[in-house]
Amino acid sequence: MRKSISTAFFSLVSTLMVLGIVLMGFSEWVLFSNYFASDRYETLDQVVGVTQRAAQYLVQEAELPEGDELDTLSTKLEIIGESAEAYLFFTDNDGRVMIASSPDKLESLTVPEEMMEKIDTADADYYHVFGTLDGVLTEKSYITVSEMCDERGSQSGWLFLCSSGEQLTEFKQQFWSNFLLSACVMLLCASILTKLLMRKLTDPLQKVTDAAQRFGGGDLSVRVEGVEGEGEVADLARTFNRMAEDIQ
């Protein structure tokens, strides 16, 4: 099936626009996701110092407090976590959970050995990871892990500060819905403008085509009318008219 110039050009422009929109959406999503993760980790890193000072009891003592002291400590940890929209828990060196601000967020009370090895071998002060810690957490979360040390400077355990990844899911849904809406509006407007511009470009070509067909049918008096100005199409119309006059 033969396509007209306007149809072929419109198809090409539409394809390029769709590819451009897809590429733009993907790049923006990557940038926003990285920014979102960076912001969450930065917030969690800032809360780590406060949490460690509030939980100094765990660092200095070999055993957990009991009764009212344990309730008080748990309340402090919960308040600190809520201030950063996060929850936290402490483990010993082997990854066994000693205390947690939100026990309902934990599926398991032991961090897998493979995960502990990754954390232990990390060179940075804080270990960042997004996930469930191999099934320890009930939902995917942004996690900052920090080493705990006693008064002698020896490692006494690990602090896990977690922020729910549900905000990322909500952000993802809102982002794509807004992006698709804006993309559809942009495509609609671009299609209308392209149609209008293509009409201005193809109408002169159509006049030349019609004149050439009539001329080829034997009407030697036909001329291209209404094509003026500069440009290739106008030059083509003038050349056709001169050719028709010479032949006639």
Image (tube, grey):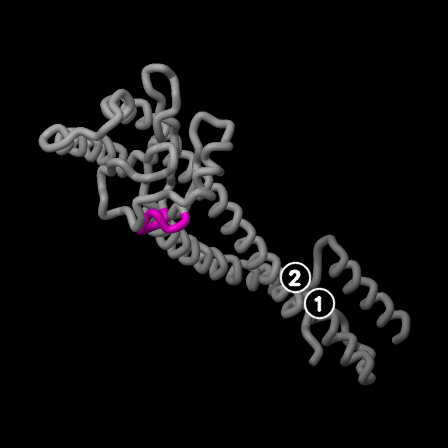
Identity, as a three-letter code, of the amino acid under mark 1: Leu
Where's the C terminus, which quadrant?
bottom right
Q: Is residue 25 magenta?
A: no
Residue 205: mark: 1
Q: Quadrant of residue 18?
A: bottom right
Density class for disc 2 (Cα within 10 Å; few <14, some 14-19, many ≥20) is some
> Going by the image, does 150 lie left or right of 22?
left
Q: Label 2: which residue?
A: 201
Residues at badges 2 and 1 in contact (C-beta under 8 Å)?
Answer: yes
Where 152 falls versus 6 (above or below)? above
Q: Residue at x 80, y 77 (%)?
A: 221
Where 107 falls versus 3 (above or below)? above
> Going by the image, does 64 lie left or right of 193?
left
> Going by the image, does 151 lie left or right of 193?
left
Residue 150: mark: none
The magenta span reads 134-140
Where's the N terminus, which quadrant?
bottom right
Q: Position of residue 42 (x, y in %)?
A: 38, 30
Q: Residue at x 26, y 47 (%)?
A: 105
Q: Position of residue 41 (x, y in %)?
A: 39, 34
Identity, as a three-letter code, of the amino acid under mark 2: Leu
Q: Position of residue 4 (x, y in %)?
A: 68, 72
